[in-house]
Image (cartoon, rainbow, N blue to C red):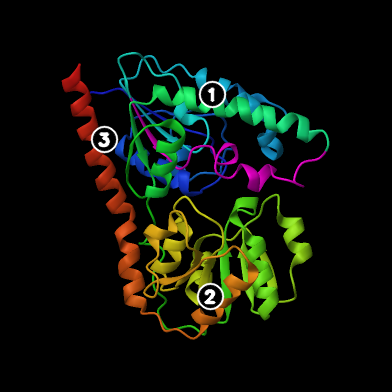
Amino acid sequence: MKNARVALVHDWLTGRRGGEKVLEVLAEIFPSAPIYTLFHFPGSQIPEIEKRSIRTSFLQRMPLLRGHYRHYLPLFPLAAELFDLQSFDLVVSSSHCTAKGVIPGPEALHVSYVHSPVRYAWNQYFAYFGPGKLGPASRFVIPPMIHRLRTWDVASSARVDRFIANSRAVAGRIEKYYRRTAEVVHPPVDTDFFTLPSSEPERKYFLAVTALVPYKRIDLAVAACNLRGYPLKIVGDGPDYRALRKSAGPTVEFLGAVEGTDLRRLYQEATAYLMPGEEDFGISAVEAQACGTPVVALGRGGVLETVRPGETGLYFEETTPASLAGALDKCRVMNFNKASLRAHALMFSRGVFREKMETRLAEMWREFKDSR
């Protein structure tokens, strides 16, 4: 890849979630590559990304974008297709929505790292738009719009030469929806920052760190802790905030956005980290383990690759408050070895991810060039 002209593509830059952490490492691997993204909220990324050449789509100029960018979803595919990538030899996209649908040059290699096929169009459609979730007008607008998005999503998957998935669960979705194979490289976790506490804290609460959106199923965590009267701290915000706040009992606390050392301390002092919804991978669960905190999770999806039941956490099997509450009861009386939790988390470190991605991208590039 020494002389290759490389472009990086990411859906949008509005915060530092799992996708952005993948992009950060890709940007380290390709320090001169411009970053193409549908829109960018200045100041939302680390300085190393903010100072890069960031090239946005026409959506950047749309009114009320910062608070209502989801309303522009029907324009996302068009915006991705209008990026001019014809001068690049290698295009690496980091995609959970439409980034993988860009149009590379005919002689270019396109490798797409997929966090998930569009969740609200495929496996999480009913979590977002199922019975009782749409108003009278939306029932006539949303289903056909999502149908068109699915059609485009499948068609545009043919523009990708090689897929890399962030988990075996996501690789399975790629095979199911796109009929394509994908190898797996787990995303990076900052295990240098998320570390064990210097002394054993008094663990009094359960913790969830997540966007408050339907498929995360934070409603289950709230209901389970209401049922038992267990303290629960919730970090994050999102469209479900008001409904969750309304249903929360006196032991549930909403903390909003928390970052840095304050977030690390919350991980370190929690009895357990809760993951009540099906996750693609679940970086926050690994961050918790790096801090010596076990995970209680729904036994589906990416968590099957990140949590070892009985060693680094527990699974619950039914999406009911009673099932989760039973797992919380069990977790409270178990003793987890902090060294084992930490050692497991180190398997997903930033350094491990970078080494694997550099190796595989270089191999894919050589194979591509040899086949021309």
Closer to viewer: mark 3 or mark 1: 1
Q: Is residue 355 within the magenta segment?
A: no
Q: Which residues are magenta?
A: 110-135
Q: Earlier in the sequence, mark 1 or mark 2?
A: 1
Residue 245 position by quadrant: bottom right
- The answer to whether residue 1 of the structure is visible from this angle is no
Residue lying furthest right? 136
Inspect the image, locate mark 1, and give the three-letter code of the amino acid beneath it.
Answer: Trp
Question: Is disc 3 in contact with disc 2, using a CB cutoff of under 8 Å?
Answer: no
Other residues around mark 3 within 10 Å, as few (<14) / some (14–19) / many (≥20): some
In the displayed structure, would residue 93 be above or below residue 220?
above
228 with respect to 186 (left or right): right
**Residue labelled with disc 1:** 152
Point 36% across, 71% down: residue:
341
In the displayed structure, would residue 312 be above or below residue 95?
below
Query: What SS does tag 2 mark?
Result: helix
Inspect the image, locate mark 2, and give the three-letter code of the amino acid beneath it.
Answer: Ala
Inspect the image, locate mark 3, and give the three-letter code of the amino acid beneath it.
Answer: Leu
Whole-angstrom CA distance, mark 3 to mark 2, is 41 Å
Q: Nearer the viewer, residue 297 or 350?
A: 297
Other residues around mark 1 within 10 Å, as few (<14) / some (14–19) / many (≥20): some
Q: Nearer the viewer, residue 281 or 19?
A: 281
Mark number for residue 166? none
Quarter of the rendering occupied by the C terminus: top left
Mark number for residue 361? 3
Q: Earlier in the sequence, mark 3 or mark 1?
A: 1
Q: Is residue 134 within the magenta segment?
A: yes
Query: What SS does tag 1 mark?
Result: helix
In the displayed structure, would residue 338 be above or below residue 258?
below
